[in-house]
Amino acid sequence: MPTVKADSGKSIEPVPAGVHQAVCYGVIDLGTQDPGNPQYRAARKVMICWELPHETISTSDGPQPRIISSEYTMSIGKKATLRGILESWRGRPFTNEELGGFDLKNIIGANCLLNIVHKPGKADPSRIYARIQGVMPLTKGMAPVRPSMDTVVFDIPESGPIVVPSAVPEWIRAKIDASDEANARSNSRVTQAETVADTADSEDIPF
């Protein structure tokens, strides 16, 4: 089976391809990101993180659920990818009222089915990555689960220091540090001592 390299150099298998039950545990504002291509404009990005309760990985603390995340432009405009993902997940379109302002924290604790595919890396095709191809609601009769991890909701404030929850991995913090918002402030980022946790009900959460 193809493997990928973690930052530590340890070889790990990507999340298996296929359809997996998942529960959202994190919504992280990445700020305005440089697309790295002059053909595209900088855009405000958000990272959505899911836990896969039926896929585990061995850690020093014992088996833990696998996690996967995906980055989206923070927009639910007519052609926005995030809008398509959320409407597919909900199984219904947004109302005009919701299009006026939808709070992404509403997806924390919501269950779904993720269609995960394996794709080669652009820079190094020998590296295989797990990517989210689609997000769908649970099928009838499936029991929802709640996240086993602390849930995280993070928004970059309009002013002042950027205080990132300690549960946010360093590689995501590096993205926040590279944002236009962080670069515009002298003391861009402070790591919060304790995780900001939100509890999720055990029943599937409508949003």
Image (cartoon, rainbow, N blue to C red):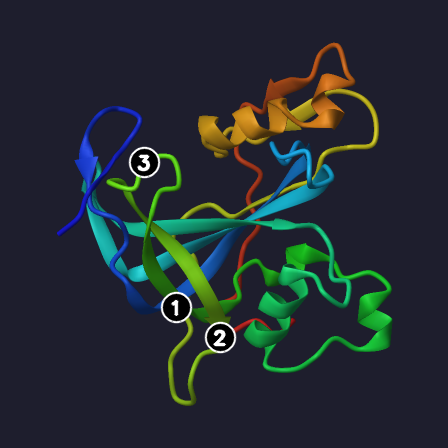
Left or right of 139? Residue 108 is right
Looking at marks 3 and 2 on the same chain, the residue that comes earlier in the sequence is marked by 3
Q: Which residue is mark 3?
A: 124
Q: Secondary structure at mark 2?
A: strand
The residue positioned 60% from the left and 51% from the top of the image is 72
Q: Quadrant of residue 89?
A: bottom right
Question: What amino acid type is highlighted by mark number 3?
Answer: Asp
What residue is rendered at 25% in x and 59% in y?
16
Looking at the rendering, which quadrant does residue 4 occupy?
A: top left
Instruction: Report how far apart the C-alphas of labels 1 and 3 lie in the structure.
Output: 23 Å
Horizontal side of residue 49 vs 96, given as left or right: left
Near mark 3 (Cα within 10 A), the count class, few <14, some 14-19 or many ≥20, is few
Label 1 CA crowd tier, 10 Å (few <14, some 14–19, many 20+): some
**Residue that appears at 58% across and 67% down:** 85
Amino acid bearing label 2: Met
Task: Identify the residue shown where x is 83% and y is 26%.
Answer: 159
- What percent of the width, then of the height, locates residue 188? 69, 17
Residue type pointed to by label 1: Asn
Q: Residue 12: where, in percent of width, then height?
A: 20, 40
- Image depth: mark 3 or mark 2 in front: 3
Q: Is residue 200 above or below residue 153?
A: below
Label 2 packing within 10 angstroms: few (<14), some (14-19), many (20+): some
| Above-or-below relation of 181 to 136 | above
Please tell me which residue lies in front, 9 or 53. 9
Of the 4 image quadrants, the one containing the C terminus is bottom right
Circle 2/circle 1 CB separation < 8 Å: yes
Most distant residue in the left direction: 1
Give the labeled residue for mark 1: 115
- Answer above or below: position of 148 versus 133: above
Sequence-wise, which precedes: disc 1 or disc 3? 1
User: Which numbered marker is on residue 136?
Assistant: 2
